[in-house]
């Protein structure tokens, strides 16, 4: 212990830091470098120390993609709990631009940096060094590095895709979870079986390959049962699903079966031993989308089949015939046959008729059953529309046919809508759909008689601003509507123009 008169040695002092910082580290699963975070720390920490900086906290995202900020808990924690809420540090240290993120939207990368500046923090990329305030080229160089980081991800994604395509063309499994009933089989460099891979297991040698093999016997039996009931017994997907649920058989996801799960199996060609790749596309965190069939990579006889190709082809033929029956033209043909047999059209009749599309299908394609019925008489309705147009032309100075409506004397727009009577018990009604487009002033309903040569029975003037109904059924007993909107002739057109 020194005496009070002895000179104190002030040369040894506790070091003081010139600034404080938070560090951010990241690497993606594709880097295949489990020590990447530690390697970044070994570079960033000495860089800060040599410049009298103190790192007070480290945020990290091991095995996380840098394409977006989503899915990076370390990055989100840094932005929300440190950048926005703490004022005891000045810099955010990151090894280089690619560790900050490989954002495909360069503006998004810059946006996060700008948000840091908004809260008084500056992002520093240690490989580039501390920026000089008088260096006008530094922002340009940063933007170039962002572009290069994004381009690297695009090039890597393209290389991975091409590699997977080549693997699929050779008949091997390109990755992902195997289909229900299959298991992944590891092959050595000589393409000889090594072992069945369990969920989560991967090949350990680059030259090894993975193919598919039949899995659990019970699952294989379920797949074959689904195809048999569909192709031989003619059962619908939902009926097949109901049978599986009654038998207590769990679906591929462990839940109850439904028609979609059954249909997914019935339409998958891989059950015939054909390797199919590129059915969907999802690159660089973009939404997944289905590819057209001509983009699929198909390699037949790649592994042991579960279903014979002839059985699979029969299932696809059933789907194709069903799809054909749901085309508008075919649906109208079936509706016309129903009308010829029963003299009317009802949803109950449609439901009760085998192999006929459901009422909801008619609703989807035509808007309603009534609208579909009117389409059966397109020829008559078109001829009537032309006749009404001629009558209007004789009354006014000018008629211009624009798209599907008339422009009369450049003052009034009219949509002519003829309607044949729909049988309803012992009576009939006429169906109209008032047009709600802003460009249409009046929907002119034209009820026709039920004759071999239909006659115009009158007119129903439906102003868009007064009639808000999506559709109208006009009976002969609809006195209020007839009094309000009904007219014997077309004098209403002249009155509206005067």
Image (tube, grey):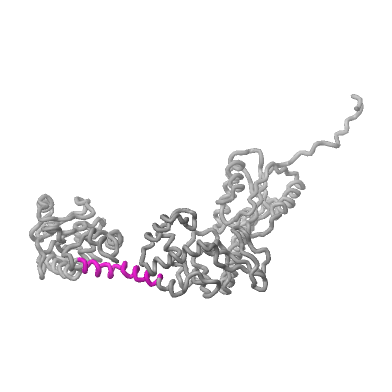
The reply, left or right, for residue 297 in relation to residue 361 is: right
Which quadrant is the N terminus positioned in? top right
Between residue 261 and residue 413, name the one nearer to us.
261
Q: Position of residue 140 (x, y in %)?
A: 62, 57
In the visual, does 20 lie left or right of 481? right
Q: Which residues fall within the magenta stretch?
A: 315-338
Q: How many marks?
A: 0
* Residue 49 at x, y percent in the picture: 76, 46
Q: Residue furthest left?
A: 488
- Above-or-below relation of 322 to 134: below
Q: Is residue 455 above or below residue 49?
A: below
Check residue 302 for magenta coloring.
no
Which quadrant is the C terminus positioned in?
Answer: bottom left
Q: Residue at x 49, y 61 (%)?
A: 288
**Where does the image place residue 158, in percent across and percent down from the top left?**
58, 67
- Along the viewing direction, whichever of 315 and 382 lies nearer the viewer: 315
Q: Residue at x 11, y 58 (%)?
A: 427
Per the picture, the main secondary structure of the magenta-coloured stretch is: helix
**Residue 5, how many percent across, how many down?**
91, 25
As drawn, is 433 to the left or to the right of 42? Answer: left
Q: Quadrant of residue 164?
A: bottom right
Residue at 60%, 44% in the rendered image: 77
């Amino acid at each position: 212990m020194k005496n009070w008169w002895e000179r104190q040695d002030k040369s040894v002092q506790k070091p003081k830091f010139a600034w404080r910082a938070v560090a951010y580290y990241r690497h993606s699963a594709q880097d295949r470098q489990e020590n990447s975070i530690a390697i970044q720390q070994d570079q960033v920490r000495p860089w800060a120390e040599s410049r009298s900086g103190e790192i007070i906290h480290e945020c990290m995202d091991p095995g996380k993609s840098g394409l977006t900020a989503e899915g990076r808990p370390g990055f989100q924690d840094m932005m929300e709990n440190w950048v926005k809420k703490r004022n005891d540090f000045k810099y955010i240290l990151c090894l280089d631009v690619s560790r900050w993120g490989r954002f495909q939207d360069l503006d998004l990368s810059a946006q996060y940096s700008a948000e840091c500046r908004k809260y008084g923090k500056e992002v520093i990329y240690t490989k580039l060094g501390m920026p000089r305030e008088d260096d006008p080229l530094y922002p340009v160089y940063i933007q170039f590095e962002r572009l290069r980081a994004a381009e690297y991800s695009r090039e890597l994604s393209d290389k991975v895709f091409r590699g997977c395509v080549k693997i699929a063309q050779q008949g091997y499994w390109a990755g992902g979870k195997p289909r229900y009933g299959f298991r992944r089989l590891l092959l050595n460099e000589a393409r000889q079986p090594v072992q069945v891979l369990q969920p989560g297991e991967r090949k350990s040698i680059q030259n090894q390959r993975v193919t598919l093999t039949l899995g659990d016997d019970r699952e294989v039996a379920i797949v074959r049962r689904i195809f048999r009931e569909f192709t031989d017994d003619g059962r619908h997907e939902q009926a097949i699903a109901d049978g599986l649920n009654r038998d207590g058989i769990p679906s591929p996801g462990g839940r109850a079966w439904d028609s979609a799960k059954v249909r997914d199996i019935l339409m998958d060609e891989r059950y015939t031993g054909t390797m199919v790749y590129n059915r969907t596309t999802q690159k660089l965190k973009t939404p997944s989308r289905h590819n057209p069939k001509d983009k699929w990579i198909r390699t037949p006889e790649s592994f042991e089949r579960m279903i014979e190709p002839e059985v699979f082809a029969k299932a696809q033929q059933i789907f194709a015939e069903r799809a054909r029956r749901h085309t508008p033209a075919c649906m109208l043909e079936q509706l016309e046959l129903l009308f010829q047999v029963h003299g009317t059209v009802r949803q109950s009749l449609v439901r009760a008729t085998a192999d006929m599309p459901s009422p909801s299908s008619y609703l989807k394609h035509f808007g309603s059953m009534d609208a579909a019925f009117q389409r059966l008489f397109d020829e008559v309705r078109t001829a009537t529309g032309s006749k009404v147009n001629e009558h209007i032309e004789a009354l006014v100075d000018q008629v211009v046919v624009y798209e599907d409506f008339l422009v009369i004397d450049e003052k009034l727009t009219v949509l002519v809508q003829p309607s044949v009577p729909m049988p309803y018990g012992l009576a009939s009604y006429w169906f109209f759909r008032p047009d709600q487009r802003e460009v249409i002033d009046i929907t002119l309903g034209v009820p026709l008689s039920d004759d071999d040569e239909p006659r115009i029975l009158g007119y129903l003037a439906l102003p868009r601003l007064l009639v808000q109904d999506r559709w109208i059924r006009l009976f002969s007993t609809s006195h209020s509507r007839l009094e309000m909107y009904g007219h014997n002739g077309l004098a209403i057109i002249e009155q509206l123009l005067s």
